Image (spheres, rainbow, N blue to C red):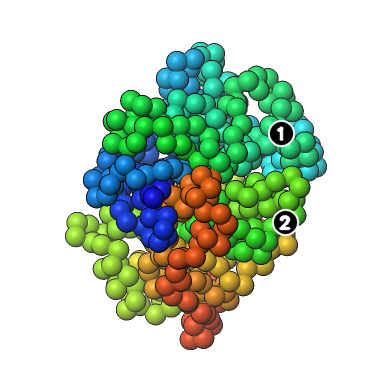
Amino acid sequence: MLLLGLDLGSSSVKASVLDAATGRVVASAQSPAEEMPINAPRPGWAEQDPAVWWEHTGRAVRAALAKIDALRVRAIGISYQMHGLVTLDARNEVVRPAIIWCDSRAVEIGAKAFADLGPELCRSRLLNSPGNFTGSKLRWVKENEPEAFKRIHKIMLPGDYLALRLTGEAQTTASGLSEGALWDFSQDRPADFLLAHWGIDPTLLPGLTPTFGPQATLLPAIAAELGLPAGIPVTYRAGDQPNNAFSLNVLQAGDIAATGGTSGVVYGVTDRLAYDPESRVNSFAHVNHTAKDPRLGVLLCLNGAGILNAWLRRTLGEGMSYEKMNALAAAVPAGSDGLTVLPFGNGAERMLGNRQPGAQWHGLDFNRHQAGHLCRAAQEGIAFAFRHGIQGMQATGLSPKRMRAGNANLFLSPIFRETLASTLGVTIELVSTDGAAGAARAAGMGAGIFATTADAFRSLDVLATIEPNPSLVAPCAEAYARWEQVLKRALA
């Protein structure tokens, strides 16, 4: 019995097939090989065409299924990039390009709603400011593209759109609405009060479906197109960070997960309806949240993280690889000989009050600094941004001592993970999983193939444990203090 997991990111779509009997991935594929484009019609904007997502979903699924007996697939799980806005007309055609997670155009709209409705009301009911989330992006469309807004029949998160293309059903989840600041925790229902404030009809929201469980079945034509059995169900969907936490078996209060892809994330689980008074981090309904048994994911998101490393790889020229960058960085001492990098070049940063200081390099000496210094300083700058942001998590009662991360992206770099462990004073466990594999495992939970979480995670392997390096603690502390001073001046 096989399970299919889809992970729709802003860079690519990955499909993984999990054998339910062994808990092992038996096939996987990714499309495209390089990053999908992010369109920026204006500074601070970020858009993608949902049709491109669907094209690469098909390619990834067909490539993965070519390696196995597709007729054994029994359920589908979906993970997706959070906070995006997909707008559809009455024929389920896309009205305008999707406004994705790192787009900053709605910052002022969210801030105004926060002030108009009152911080206490927003925090007590949304656990967040409306911020730059999905709801604020929809209000931006209403204000700035009224003709497009009139055509909207339903709005969706990226994963809801993917499920619609698979099944024909327009649905979303409470966890999904919470990530768009559209869930009222005090009433355990969609945040109609916020939509009313903005003059938005709540019927634009899709109907609710559980995060785990049979949601809708695969359309016959789509099954034939993808090479899947007709009628198999979608049994799970979640945003990429809640799903990443699930993938790492981070489900109970006190558990901490981290990722280092295009963005960097620390995601901690609490059983309290907690929020950061300064909105530096955000609280969302976790995949296993219920009103009676709360599970909130406290999310620190750094827009500027792995995208800095990717930019640097391209900038260093043809033939440069991440492996070469890591080797160059390893030859440079901790602290990068005084070179300091702020990685904030990918939109407004919530942990900085939605400000955009941009990516900055400080202390660059043309006579001393070489490519290795650039590589190490970039990774150190990202690690220091993690530490700065975790201060907001502590306001919710979370204080990470141990975190789990997938063995992927930035966490493949010994320099990055050692710097992060030594800067934070935490132990990092690297686990053999990723978002697509986690979505497949969750599909098994939703389909009832795994009776318990213990069954689902019995084969999850810890590949490595990284402790703080005593020889790095002092130089990292010194470099972090310098980094904080640079950030303070940048924000002044």
Give coordinates of residue 236: x percent, y percent: 51, 43
Residue 162 or residue 424, whichever sits in front: 162
Question: Callout 2: few (<14), some (14-19), or many (20+) C-alpha neighbours within 10 Å?
Answer: some
User: Which quadrant would residue 47 be assigned to in this image?
Assistant: top left
User: Which quadrant would residue 75 be assigned to in this image?
Assistant: top left
SS for dot 2: loop
Residue 354 or residue 324, whichever sits in front: 324
Question: What residue is shown at x 43% (from left), y 22% (from top)?
Answer: 94
| Residue position for label 2 | 271
Q: Is residue 29 left or right of residue 21?
A: left
Residue 336's place in the image compared with 133, above or below, is below
Residue 331's place in the image compared with 117, above or below, is below
- Asked if residue 362 shows in the view, the reply is no
Residue 373 or residue 125, whichever sits in front: 125
| Residue position for label 1 | 189
Which dot marks residue 293? none
Question: Callout 1: few (<14), some (14-19), or many (20+) C-alpha neighbours within 10 Å?
Answer: some
Viewport quadrant of the C terminus:
bottom right
> Disc 1 to disc 2, how far (Cα)?
19 Å
Residue 282's place in the image compared with 101, above or below, is below
Q: Is residue 233 left or right of residue 485?
A: left
- Asked if residue 313 shows in the view, the reply is yes
SS for dot 1: strand
Q: Is residue 440 left or right of residue 153?
A: left
Residue 416's place in the image compared with 192, above or below, is below
Which amino acid is tagged 1? Answer: Arg
Which amino acid is tagged 2? Answer: Asp
Give coordinates of residue 26: x percent, y percent: 32, 56
Question: What residue is shown at x 49% (from left), y 15% (from top)?
Answer: 90
Question: What residue is shown at x 38% (from left), y 53% (from top)?
Answer: 18
Give coordinates of residue 418: x percent, y percent: 46, 75
